[in-house]
Image: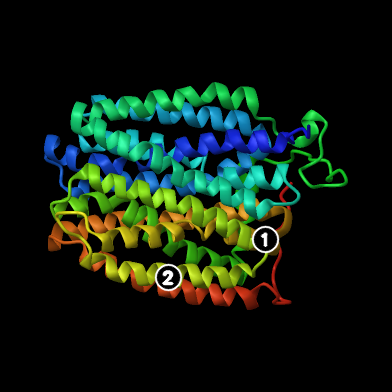
Amino acid sequence: MTRVHRAWVVAAVAFVAIVGAAGFRATPGVLIVPLQNEFGWDRGTISLAVSVNLLLYGVTAPFAAALMERFGIRRVVAVALVLVSAGSALTTHMTQPWQLVLCWGVLVGLGTGSMALVFAATIANRWFHTQRGLVTGILTAAGATGQLVFLPLLAALVDSHGWRTAAWTVSLAALAVVPLVVLAVRERPADVGLLPYGATEEPPPFVRTGSPAKQAIGALRGASRTRPFWLLAGGFFICGASTNGLVGTHFIPAAHDHGLPSTTAASLLALVGIFDIVGTIGSGYLTDRVDSAKLLWWYYSLRGLSLFVLPSLFASSLHPHMLVFVLFYGLDWVATVPPTVTLCRQVYGDQGTLVFGWVFASHQIGAAVAATVAGAIRTSLGSYDLAWYGAGALCMVAAGLSLGIGSARTAPTRVLVPEIA
């Protein structure tokens, strides 16, 4: 019997951790209405905490990547899970909006940010020589699975036992993952006497040099001098705005505005998660075979078209057209990640993971901006329609930026990211 390569075991544990991180971060979507009802806070105020969460989820990523290089994956991810657990538990005692910002915005944002997509990229780049696109797609799909597992359960808990029970569930679930990470994850294949999956020779020995902060800032300084970085970051800014920031945060309260029960809306987001598993793994498969810049053009264009249609689909009861949107949008939810990771690696080589950390930071900055702006639009206009149409138009801009990446990759004047000692 053929023995399973240890790389797949590490990838499986990473999948579980990323599932948890995605579910923990997505939880505010089911808390907005209950917090509004209990404390009387408007949606703009609650959206501020969500925006801080989204912002730190992204800005933490490049530093988390550097910390993983310096101190190891296991330590960084274990500490991150403890932060998530603490932040979620402390929200059950809050009485003021700033406490929500501190607990869910700062603590949970820092924790989940340390297990964000740079974690997936680090595992794929360290443990796999072949099938990197597929593995990145699978681990990215773990984020959708987090929604699938947590959102309907948490929505049901909020309805039956209150939002504090949901917060405690998140806290305990985060702690439960810590032993699994500590026991099963190893830093590199060489630690257990193996080559990366698909490799035929030893990779260059890894030497830890410099501080994590300097590595992360140095990667940004070098990449920011190149055109591909700004095209990738701009497109991913819009990607975050149109997914986590808008749909991930405001879809449930928007559906509630039209009379659809929150549990039903949460189940629809879970269906987005189901279809995204298929879409993202498929995107990983295509990324190993098709030009990544062209894939991004298709993904952003199709997403924009779906968002233009969404405002007309909300109703007090579920109907087939909304299910079609969920299927279509779900297939495209984070299909952008595998080609974006691949482009970072193609352009920036060994520092591609650190550069992707900053590209992902732009994703979450976009998400934070969209979460705040959409909340403000709802507060001032009484409707989210303008937010949906605006996001659709931005996706068309992202599609155009993606086409520019194809020519920018081969530009002879490209500035390479410097190594930081």
Relative to residue 260, is residue 102 drawn left or right?
right
Q: In the displayed image of the protein, which residue is found farthest to the right?
A: 201
Classed neighbour count for the residue bearing mark 1: other residues with Cα under 10 Å, few (<14), some (14–19), many (≥20)? some
- Identified at 57% across, 52% down, the residue is 137
- Identified at 58% across, 27% down, the residue is 181
Q: Quadrant of residue 383?
A: bottom left
Q: N-terminal of the two: label 2 or label 1?
A: 1
Q: Is residue 228 above or below residue 342?
A: below
Counting from the top left corner in percent of width and height, residue 187 is at 70, 33
- Identified at 64% across, 55% down, the residue is 133
Name the residue that disc number 2 marks: 302
User: Does the CB distance between marks 2 and 1 fall below 8 Å?
Assistant: no
Relative to residue 224, is residue 55 drawn left or right?
left
Mark 2 falls on what kind of element?
A: helix
Q: Amino acid at mark 2?
A: Leu
Relative to residue 393, is residue 73 drawn left or right?
right
- Identified at 66% across, 33% down, the residue is 9
Mark 1 falls on what kind of element?
A: loop
Q: Is residue 378 above or below residue 420?
A: below
Label of residue 421 in the image: none
Quarter of the picture containing the N terminus is top right
Classed neighbour count for the residue bearing mark 2: other residues with Cα under 10 Å, few (<14), some (14–19), many (≥20)? some
Relative to residue 166, is residue 358 drawn left or right?
right
Counting from the top left corner in percent of width and height, residue 405 is at 59, 73
Name the residue that disc number 1 marks: 288
Q: How many numbered discs sit on the rendered protein?
A: 2
Q: How is the image coloured?
A: rainbow
Counting from the top left corner in percent of width and height, residue 393 is at 35, 73
